[in-house]
Amino acid sequence: MTAVSVEKKINGTEPRFDPRALAEAEATRIKAAAEAEAIRIEAEGKAEAEKIKAAEEARKQKIVNDKAEARAREEQAARDARIAKHNRERKEQEQAAREAEEKVAAQEQAEAEKAAEIAAAEEQWRNYALRFYAVCSIVALPVQIAAFYNPNALWLLAAPLMLEGGAWVVLKGARAAAISHRPHWHYRLIAWLLAFIAAGINLWHGLNAFDPATAIGTAFASIAGPGVYDLYEHGQLRKREGRLSLRQRRAKRKAERAAAAWKATEEKRRAAVQAAAEQAEADRLKKLAENRSNDFPEVWKHALKLAAALGETTVTEPIWIRAHVDIEGCEPGDSVDIIRTRNANAKRVELARESRSVNTLSKTVNAQRVPHLPPTSGRGSKTGPKVRGVRRSGDAPKYSDIARKQAQLERTIGKKD
């Protein structure tokens, strides 16, 4: 024990124990510790919340980034697909263009080869015709010269040359007339006349001066030479003028007859179809008129009057609609009973969708009126005397527990729906 303590003890000044102060100090300490703990918990909660929020934000950002990356990959894939499709279509178009060009070139080449072949054949045919004409003239001229030989008139020897050469010259004139698009039939007629005259001279002189074989052969030569060459020129004329051959003309006439027959058959069929359609429409209108007159006699009578007043011979659809509106007050297909039934059914459907019974449908305008309470005839005070017909709090009987639970269950189901 120190001197100060001894002195305080002697003097009686030693402090005594204070429970209230100790309790307050303890309470302050506990409060401070609780506040510090609360601050710590709050800080930890905020830190955890921030951490969770950061993790959530990171997750959302990752989702956004993944979606953006997936979208970018899809767009790139779609772009690549479009480019590949475009390249494929371009290659296909180029291939088709090349094939078309090759086909056209092959067709042109085939046509050129065919034209060259035809030209070569035509030229060969012309050369053969000229040579044959020359051979026939050589065969026919000696007999004609012998026929016109006269020592006293040697100038008659030019007659055979005039006959054979005249036919040749006239055939050339026919060719020139055809090229100039002039009539050429008379040229060919004169050429054949000269050929027959030469043939007649050869036949007459050959039979008198030589044997029948010589006469017939030289006569045939006088006709065959101009005839063969005329055949060549005739083919050229038909080709140049675009005339058809006998077989082509027959085929064309046959096709025209078939087309005319088909056209006549098609016209008959269309007429029959049109007549059937008109008859069916007439039957339908007749049946419709009978049904309307039987089902809606008043509307039908009014429609007939409207048709007569408007200058129509039959009840048209606009007239029928107007008559129905005039008599029934609504367009065809509706009536007062139908509208009432439709409205009632609409209310039934609405109540069914609200999970309510149809029997609870109130026919009054006031939706607050309770069916098991008397109607109100005035307003009364809750504290005043009871008046007949006035509803106050507590007048209605309480619902049973089962009814309240059922109502609560229906409200819960309605909220979920």
Image: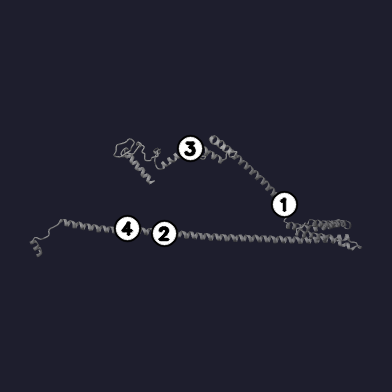
N-term-proximal mark, 2 vs 1:
2
What is the spatial separation of the Cα atoms under label 2 and label 4, in whole angstroms?
A: 25 Å
N-term-proximal mark, 4 vs 3:
4
Q: Where is residue 22, by image quadrant?
A: bottom left
Task: Say which of 185 and 39 sits in front.
Answer: 39
Residue type for callout 2:
Asp
N-term-proximal mark, 4 vs 1:
4
Residue at image point 72% right, 52% down: 249
What is the spatial separation of the Cα atoms under label 4 and label 1, in whole angstroms?
A: 102 Å
Q: How many marks?
A: 4
The x, y position of residue 372, in whole percent, is 35, 36
Q: Nearer the viewer, mark 1 or mark 3?
A: 3
Q: Quadrant of the N terminus?
A: bottom left
What is the spatial separation of the Cα atoms under label 4 and label 3, in whole angstroms?
A: 68 Å
Residue at image point 18% right, 56% down: 24
Residue type for callout 3:
Val
Whether the residues at callouts 2 and 4 have beta carbons within 8 Å, the answer is no
Badge number at residue 249: 1
> Which residue lies under the disc numbered 4?
49
What is the spatial separation of the Cα atoms under label 1 and label 3, in whole angstroms?
A: 77 Å
Q: Nearer the viewer, mark 4 or mark 1?
A: 4
Secondary structure state at the residue bearing disc 1: helix
> Which residue lies under the disc numbered 3?
336
